[in-house]
Image (cartoon, rainbow, N blue to C red):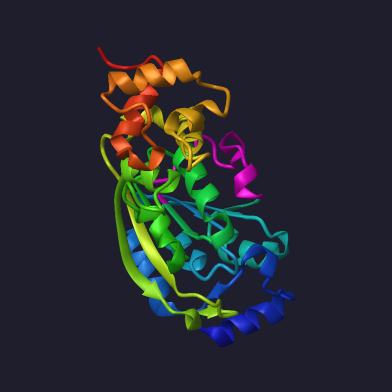
Amino acid sequence: MNKQEVLSILEKYGLQAKRSLGQNFLCNDDVIGDILEFAQLDKDVTCLEIGPGLGALSEKAVLLAGKYLAVEIDTSFQQRLEDVIVKPGGYILFEDYLHLDVKDLPIPDFAPDVILSNLPYYVMTPIMLKVLGDFPRCRKMVFMVEEDAIDRIFAKPRTKAYGPLSVLTDLFGSKKKCFTVEAGSFYPAPNTTSAVIVIERKDEAAEAGQWNPQWIGFVESAFALRRKTLINSLSSGGKYGKEAILAALRKMGLKDSVRSEELMPEEFAGLFKILQGREES
């Protein structure tokens, strides 16, 4: 799909990009091909795409995957996506993924092997955290993100960008920045360069915090008050008392004054297990 094809599709279906939804439509066949190469879809693979937009990636992915579901917030794309997704045998759900209960998906017991998404900057973190909680056994996630946001995913302890996203994705699997995508590969062209990243699940990932909402909320709470100690940050939500947190830190050999950005990802998992009473004997 190139820019002229995008313009033709927009005219045909009476559509336009909505800035409020961060819509920039991919119009570079080489980039689409590279994304699909990293996704490695085949007839044994179940695929979820979040935010297909005009379906530039979807119309090829649906033909490669054994089972394909797309979730799109913008209902004005319904006719276009039904043409390129539903007619070839895929499924489409028009919902805001951030408010979606996975039990309500149109495919019973849906469990994607691969997740694809071009993530707008303003929802990148919440969507990625929800995906990790919703589908902890997903084998591979291929995301397009703004390059300026990459640090939040790949950040290391004791750095400014280190936070819930870097901790949780690090525990979930291996991370790789695959390639950059220039603004001209989109219509309308954004003001920033994008990047495609791949996160592949570790075999032991399911054991790190069990990937339930409590675990993800725990890591988010740990960074709620970045300038405060970890004890103050975790206790501010009211779920954990200061004495319990202090005892857990001392049990792990961590200092009372430790801050969230000083902990390694594995230490967050260990601390959570102690506070939940699930520490292995």
Q: Is residue 97 visible?
A: yes
Is 136 placed left or right of 110 in the picture?
Answer: left
Q: Is residue 104 magenta?
A: yes
Quarter of the image with the C terminus is: top left
- Identify the residue at image location x=39%, y=49%: 162
Question: Along the line of sight, which residue is nearer the eye, 238 or 153?
Answer: 238
- Identify the residue at image location x=55%, y=76%: 190
The boundaries of the magenta stretch are 95-114
Q: Total marks drawn?
A: 0
Coordinates of residue 22 in the picture (x, y in percent): 62, 66
Main secondary structure along the magenta-highlighted residues: loop
- Placement of 125 over or under 224, stated as above or below: below
Question: Along the line of sight, which residue is nearer the eye, 177 or 10?
Answer: 177
- Placement of 203 over or under 121, stated as above or below: above
Is 220 placed left or right of 4 in the picture?
Answer: left
Coordinates of residue 133 in the picture (x, y in percent): 47, 37
Coordinates of residue 12 in the picture (x, y in percent): 70, 79
Q: Is residue 99 magenta?
A: yes
Question: Along the line of sight, which residue is nearer the eye, 55 or 159?
Answer: 159
Q: Residue furthest top?
A: 281
Coordinates of residue 9 in the picture (x, y in percent): 64, 78
Is 164 placed left or right of 255 in the picture?
Answer: right
- Placement of 201 over or under 251, stated as above or below: below
Q: Is residue 42 visible?
A: no
